[in-house]
Image (cartoon, rainbow, N blue to C red):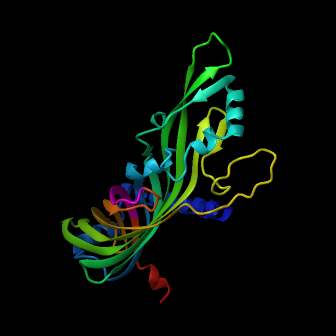
Amino acid sequence: MTIAEQMFMNYFRKTLNKLLLLTLVSLCFPSQGAAQNDSYKGMQEGWIIGLHTGVYFANSYTAGYYSGHESNENSISFVLDNKYRRDEILNYFNAQTYTWTQEDLPQNMRYEPEINIGFLARNNITEKWGVFFNFNHVQLTAKGNFILQFDPDQIVTEPNTGVFEIYGVEDRTNIDIGIHREFSLLSPSIAYYGEIGVNLNNTRVKESAIQMEDLHYSIINRYGAGRGYVPNLPQTEYNFRLGGIGVGILGGMGVKFLFSQNLTIDTGFTSYVKYINLDGYKSFNVHWAPYARIMYNGFFDFID
């Protein structure tokens, strides 16, 4: 992530925290505007914008992309079978040799749930129907463990088993376009709704690596096919892009809390059926994401 992107994300988080705090204050100390919601009959027509945050639960299928297996785009053998890396590892662990097999690599890599943030714009065509555009971003980490069998540099010592971490980090951006339908009111200030639509996602691999105590190695070969790390030799590293564009469909439902004719809080969840464009793992799978949105109607009135 660039410095500019970091500054934007920090500003976005601070703004979101302020809005959430304002919302909590509104919940604890309802204003007179909330008491006027008895006349509420449906969504106000026109454009409404909001901030989006939630927890993204990624399907673990694509986490296998980072497992280091020989069939993957990035294999752990790029490091462990490299003569110079092997010497570094053996010297660090004071061992004579090590062995490993494909069975020593993780079989169940999993993503950790992560916070996603973004924004949403919706055009309320009628009091019940609207079309929306939602953009959100999440950085995901997949983790697992692999095993090395060390033969210590001592004749009478039994082999040692080392368990180390293998992981991957990726940026995933979701663009959702769909239809919003508001249903009956649960109370003068609460309504429920449903959404359906299509998803366009963009995945970018940031890191695929192993961590062996203080030793850290990337298993992405950026030197080119058939080439590997050689110490003290000028080598060109190619900053090629791993990942790509994927598509899918979505459906969800939620509850809308009305604080005034202009301010609402939406809480709900979205389920996706989509594929993520990672080489060797392009299959449709289910992902889901609970969320909260702060929505404001009337933002574009300032422009008129």
State the image quarter where residue 249 is shown: bottom left
Where residue 57 sits in the image (x, y, percent)? Answer: 38, 52
Question: Residue drawn 32% across and 74% down?
Answer: 178
Where residue 270 sits in the image (x, y, percent)? Answer: 32, 61
Question: Is 293 drawn above or below residue 235 in the view shown?
Answer: below
Where residue 117 sits in the image (x, y, percent)? Answer: 47, 61
| Outermost residue toward the bottom in this view | 304
Camera-nearest residue between 230 and 290: 230
Question: Residue drawn 68% across and 18% down?
Answer: 153
Where residue 112 sits in the image (x, y, percent)? Answer: 45, 46
State the image quarter where residue 246 is shown: bottom left
Residue 79 in the magenta stretch? The answer is no
Camera-nearest residue between 154 and 127: 154
Q: Can residue 50 be seen at all in this image of the molecule?
A: no
Residue 282 in the magenta stretch? The answer is yes
Dominant secondary structure of the residues highlighted in magenta in the image: strand
> Over which residues does the magenta segment extend?
281-293
- Which quadrant is the N terminus positioned in? bottom right
